[in-house]
Image (tube, rainbow, N blue to C red):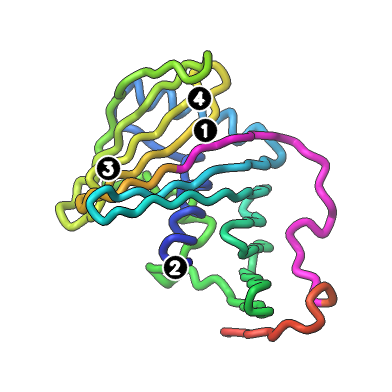
């Protein structure tokens, strides 16, 4: 699992909550999505992540889940658990019996911080309403996001919104190299009873793990 792939999943999962659109209809719909998301105390999502490239004969599927409250989250994906408690990130890798602890540097342009997760689409994209699809009785309205920078390796992103619930159904990203990544929300639960230690790293649970402190 590459660092880029892991970071991309985090961005796709969390960035949609503050999208700003240029197209009025898209803007109105996404504002409804944002308002709905902000009304919840917490969100628990089970998702499917697919990576496809017909030219390179790549076809990979992975499942994961994330629990979010404010800027805190716990993400389980591809056998790795990532916890952000609001100050530090704890990456737990059972296969290597290792925990990496790092502080978030807000000045680092490459850092995937909570603030950036919530403003990922605020600039650098053109937005327009796209097709409507019927998915198992659900009306999914797609919004097309096209990067304005010619240097961006992404050709376009399609964001699917459930018109009735105003929840994100999926996000499809197409690269200029033909690679398509799809994040599909299989389960969307809100205001769940969470443990008081939900977003707390408890070292005693990993007595044999090597603790790698980067800061």
Helix, strand or loop at disc 2?
loop
Asked whether the residues under the numbered discs 3 and 1 touch, taking CB atoms below 8 Å apart as contact, a structural biologist would say: no
Q: Residue tagged by mark 1?
A: 34
Mark 1 → mark 4, Cα distance in angstroms: 5 Å
Q: Residue tagged by mark 4?
A: 32
Magenta segment, which residues?
A: 183-203
Left or right: residue 18 versus residue 98 is left
Residue drawn at x 52%, y 33% as measured from the top left = 34
Labels 2 and 4: the sequence-earlier one: 2
Asked whether the residues under the numbered discs 3 and 2 touch, taking CB atoms below 8 Å apart as contact, a structural biologist would say: no
Labels 3 and 2: the sequence-earlier one: 2
Labels 3 and 1: the sequence-earlier one: 1
Measured along the vertical axis of the image, is residue 145 above or below residue 77? above
Front-most of residues 53 and 104: 53
Left or right: residue 51 versus residue 23 is right
Helix, strand or loop at disc 3?
strand
Residue 60 in the image, given as x and y percentages of width and height: 43, 52
Q: Residues within 10 Å of mark 2 (few under 14, many from 20)?
A: few
Question: Could you say which disc has been placed on residue 125 in the image?
Answer: 3
Residue drawn at x 63%, y 85% as measured from the top left = 212
Asked whether the residues under the numbered discs 1 and 4 touch, taking CB atoms below 8 Å apart as contact, a structural biologist would say: yes
Residue 94 in the image, given as x and y percentages of width and height: 68, 72
């Amino acid at each position: 699992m590459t660092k880029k792939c892991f970071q991309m999943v985090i961005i796709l999962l969390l960035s949609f909550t503050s999208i700003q659109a240029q197209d009025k209809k898209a803007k109105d719909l996404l504002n409804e999505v944002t308002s709905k998301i902000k009304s919840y105390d917490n969100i628990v999502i089970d998702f499917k992540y697919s990576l496809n490239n017909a030219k390179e004969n790549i076809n990979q599927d992975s499942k994961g889940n994330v629990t979010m409250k404010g800027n805190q989250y716990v993400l389980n994906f591809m056998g790795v658990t990532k916890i952000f408690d609001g100050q530090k990130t704890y990456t737990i890798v059972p296969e290597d019996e290792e925990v990496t602890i790092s502080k978030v540097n807000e000045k680092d342009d490459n850092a995937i911080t909570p603030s950036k997760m919530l403003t990922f689409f605020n600039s650098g994209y053109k937005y327009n309403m796209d097709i409507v699809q019927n998915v198992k009785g659900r009306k999914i309205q797609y919004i097309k996001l096209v990067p304005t920078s010619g240097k961006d390796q992404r050709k376009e992103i399609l964001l699917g919104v459930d018109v009735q619930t105003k929840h994100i159904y999926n996000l499809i990203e197409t690269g200029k190299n033909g690679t398509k990544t799809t994040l599909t929300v299989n389960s969307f639960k809100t205001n769940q009873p969470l443990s008081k230690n939900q977003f707390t790293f408890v070292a005693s649970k990993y007595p044999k793990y090597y603790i790698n402190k980067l800061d």
